[in-house]
Amino acid sequence: MKTILLILACLPAFAQTSEDEAAVRTTIKLMFDGMRKADSTQIKNTFLPGATLQTIAKNKEGAVSVRTDDMGKFAASVTKYPAFTLDERLSGMEIKIDAELATAWTPYVFYLKEAKSHCGVNAFTLVKVNGNWKIQNIIDTRRKENCPDLPKQ
């Protein structure tokens, strides 16, 4: 009987976590759907004000650097391409949540005009504000070799 009561007591917490995980996935999906459609408004709606996009890169000598860009600039840049020219495909997303903080780690392959361009990993930081998950930061890695084929999403 005690076991049943313990399980029942934990169900609301599990349901909340499942709902939050689904909402985090939805926010990330909406951002990439906006990129595919070249819709800067949809992209901006998934971010908190002041959000950043960071890329870890190596120069020709192999030195590592982190480049930081404003999310607004990123959102505006996608409108320079016709809809469905840019396609970032994700696989194996792992989400961790604690209160109003979520992280999502997902490998990706980026396609430009249906051609594989590069791949790597995205790490998202999201914050739950007024009941909605918003992206605060994305940091990624990029490489051109050993990129798997991923189906359209």
Image: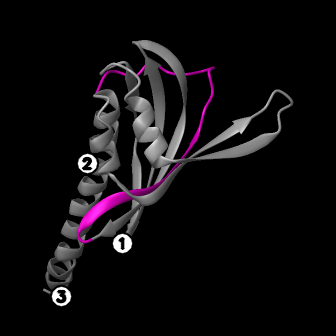
Q: Position of residue 43 (x, y in %)?
A: 33, 43
User: Which residue is under mark 1?
Assistant: 100
Q: Which mark is residue 26?
A: 2
Q: Quadrant of residue 114?
A: top left
Secondary structure type for disc 3? helix
Q: Quadrant of residue 99?
A: bottom left
Up-down relation of residue 102 to residue 122 (above or below) = below
Secondary structure type for disc 2? helix
Q: Is residue 5 magenta?
A: no
Residue that lies at the very extreme toward the bottom in this rendered image: 2
User: Which residue does the image show at 23% across and 74% down from the upper left?
Assistant: 13
Q: Is residue 140 magenta?
A: yes
Up-down relation of residue 69 to residue 37 (above or below) = below
User: Which residue does the image show at 83% across and 33% down from the upper left?
Assistant: 62
Q: Position of residue 57 (x, y in %)?
A: 69, 37
Residue 33 can be seen in this image: yes
- Neighbor class of circle 2 (other Cα within 10 Å; few <14, some 14-19, many 20+) is some
Which amino acid lies under the numbered mark 3 shown in the image of this protein? Lys
Which amino acid lies under the numbered mark 1 shown in the image of this protein? Glu
Task: Tell which tag, 2 or 3, sits nearer the viewer.
Answer: 2
Q: Position of residue 3 (x, y in %)?
A: 20, 82
User: Which residue is under mark 3?
Assistant: 2
Seen from the viewer's position, the closer of residues 75 and 27 is: 75
**Magenta part of the chain:** 130-153
Q: Is there a contact, CB below 8 Å, between mark 3 and mark 1? A: no
User: Which residue does the image show at 36% across and 72% down from the upper left?
Assistant: 100
Secondary structure type for disc 1? loop
Earlier in the chain: of badge 3 and badge 1, it is 3
- Distance from disc 2 to disc 1, alpha carbons, whole Å, reads 16 Å
Relative to 54, is 98 on the left or the right?
left
- Distance from disc 2 to disc 3, alpha carbons, whole Å, reads 36 Å
